[in-house]
Amino acid sequence: MSPGTRPLEPMEFALRCIASQGAAAYLIYLASPADIASVFGELQDELTTALPEIQAVKSSSARQLLEAVAAHDANVPLLVDASAYDAEAWRLLDRRRSSLQRSGVTAIMTTTDSFDALMRHAPNLMSWFGGDVFAFPGTEVLERRHASLREDRLAALRAWSGLTDAEVLEQARAQTLPRDPEYAEWLVLLGRGDLLNA
Amino acid sequence: MSQPAPQQTASEDRLARFRRLRGQLAPARDPSEVLVQGGYVERPDSVGRRIAAELELAPASSHVLIGGVGSGKTTELLVVDLILDAVDDTEALFVDVSRRHDIGRMKPGVVLAQVGLALTEWMDASTPGQQSRMAKSAADTLRALALGYIDPPWDPEPDYDETPGILDPPEQLDDAVQPFANCIRTLLGELSDLRPHFVVLLDGLDRMIDVSKFEEIVRQDIKALLSLGIGIVLVGPLRALYGVNKVLLEFFERSYYQPWLDVERDEGARQLLRSMLTQRVEPTVFEEKAIDRLVGSSGGVARDLFALAQSACLEAYLQGIDQIGVSQVEASVDAFGRKHMQGLRPEEIEVLQRVRTRREFVHTSESDLGLLMTRRVLEYRDRNQQPRYVVHPTIARFLKAMEP
Amino acid sequence: MREFDELQSHVLQRSLVQAGSAKDLMRTVRNQLLEASDRTKLSTPPQDVYGLVGLSDEFTPTLRKALQCARVALGAFVVTGGEKNRGRSKDLRHFKRSDGAWFDFSIVGRGYSGFVEILAYTYEIRLPVGHGAPFVRFDLNVPDGANQEGELRCHVHIGSDDVRIPAPTMTPREMLALFIDGICAASNRDGRTRTAFEHQWFAESHRMLAGDSGVDGLRERS
């Protein structure tokens, strides 16, 4: 089975884009069709914090992308949704790649199928990407990772205080829980932020 | 042509430094910018120099340059431009055909139109306000034919009817092409005192997939330019090297192949790639072993060398490391190889396994040619121009792991 | 302490409300740390900065997704920087300053439509040897609506978990600026010569600590 591209969380991909601004770099992020919209939105939020001048281009065609590139300064960072691009679109961009030459970072989101078409039909364009191609690991993987980190923190809180989750909740309800920030964090991690101001 | 790479400034923080380095190493960098900023390293027996030398002696000669993606063809074309700049009686016009026209819709006349536009622009810049009425009319007509018009700048209703003769000259150009040739002839006449010779450097035609359309362009546009006494250097499609398409090369007086560099067997090639890298950035950016690994992993494809180096640079920034070492290069090579394996069909993997294990590659199909075009298979040439095939070094270990 | 009621009341009037969402706050914190890494004030590399800053909220994944769809971000959250480390173990992941100091933090807040309110925080930095105290910790406790015992809600601990000194509330940006660039030896002069009092104090403190846990226990902990 062919090795996949390296999985990376959206914020890690965003960090790579931020570090590439002004370096004539092209980075690709792959996601499933079901995840594209939400991940694109998240990337846009992540990148806007560090690169407020970034332009998001949700083009349904390669021609629209070419128009968008021409409309912006070459140093402006771009985030492109290319999930709708098929073989013909990539062939056009391959022929017109001189028009895509720019100093600002260009981050391109697309699906695995679309990327396979790029690899097949746009050999010149693909030679610009190097190894900067990554994949969204999927919502379930991220949630598992998140849950694991949450549990690690809860374990550390339990070890520090000697209390159990149940004891903390009981004390919170009884308004006898100490006001230290650690206990506040504990309540949040247990999903009981409603007890914070009790 | 060599100048030292830009150095770190005192006020540069890590992010600024690594952004600068990544920019200097960008594979997508405009080759003309690389040349101007001193990043170019001349190959021994440089194709650009050879072509320029031929044109100095014979400015109306025709040359075609073919090579794989990322082998440096555009750069060599720019080197010709640079060298001819110093020749008083010859003007080189660099035309990227893909900039003003979709290469996927090529037809006879498109190249002539673009050359004509380049000539009018040169004329306007060199002799502002000094052109004759005939030259101005030719320029207006050419622009109208190339870019479109509402009112034609020529008389749409001539006061006589032309009747063609019985003879059909073999050199007769297509109706679409002849008017451009006529305009260009007029402009050349106007400029002949200022510049006796013009050479056109045509980039972008290597992106044509349809070789039959490429042949049409050669037989119409290129033939017309040559008949006007204009020298030609053209970057042609890789497909033109193989099979029946090879006959197209005979149209040109000289053909040149820009191969990828044989980093497996040629120490000179390895040294050349090292120099290309160290010319772009300060010497201390990479550890020595990291440079060796980059050179080996590039497979001799200059663009891939820079792509790998650029990615390794990013790894170093992210890891808080200031000098790029083997570990960062390995991460870059791994990511590159994974990308390079994407989109391969089972039958293509079979072909690649044969190339990897038995060095056998017979490109009989479009799919096989595709493996060359996409640099999964690399072709090296020895001194006798005998080809040898390898898989791109970054995918070798993945293929080995997939061995049945 | 009732003597500080007025002071505390004055200090707590300072608003800890910030525009944006919990995610915005997390990103702002992260970018400030990243910028410090780029300046080499932090020796923590950029990818570790990203790995060390986290955001948790009180929702299940399903509910969070539903809230995101509705473009509403509310509820309690915690922004964390480094692993929970009250034991002060260098084995747990933390931020490192280029002079050897190291720190971690957590910020608890509640999100509303368009803004967040910070409810509690704890930031602790451990200093290199000879920098006056082993650690400095700023705490903001959760508001105590019912029980007005006059506890110092916002305070700092300097080298002791038991001794509290009133402190102003500070925004995350201010706290991190203090930790990154503030709490350090002056760069424009040599360290002052220690007084005899300080020498004696440290020597007696060391004897006391050694007596508390035994010399072996002291070695183990260090």
Image (cartoon, helix red, strand yellow):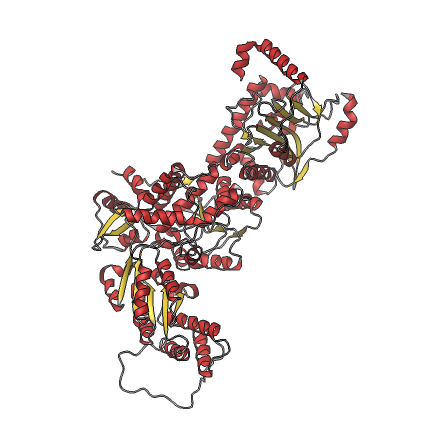
Is B208 left, or right, of C124 in this rendering? left
Vertical relation: B311 (above or below) B42: above
Q: Is residue A190 left or right of residue B279?
A: right
> Where does residue C191 sit, x and y in percent of width and height?
63, 27
Closer-to-camera residue (B353/B124): B124
Decide which of B344, B111 is in the foreground and name it: B111
Give the vertical position of B385 relative to B149 (above or below): above
Report if residue B311 is visible in the image: yes
Position above or below: C44 against A170:
below
- On the rendered image, what quadrant is the N terminus of chain A found in? top left
Residue B378 in picture, x, y percent from top left: 28, 50
Q: Nearer the viewer, residue C102 or B172?
A: C102
State whether residue C120 is above or below residue B102.
above
Give residue B271's position: percent from left, percent from top.
32, 47
Name the residue furthest bottom: B160
What percent of the width, then of the height, locates residue B171? 28, 78
Q: Quadrant of the C terminus of chain A?
A: top right
Res. A122 visible in picture: no
Q: Is residue A170 left or right of residue A78?
A: right
The number of numbered discs placed on residues in the rendered structure image is 0
Residue B11 placement: quadrant: top right
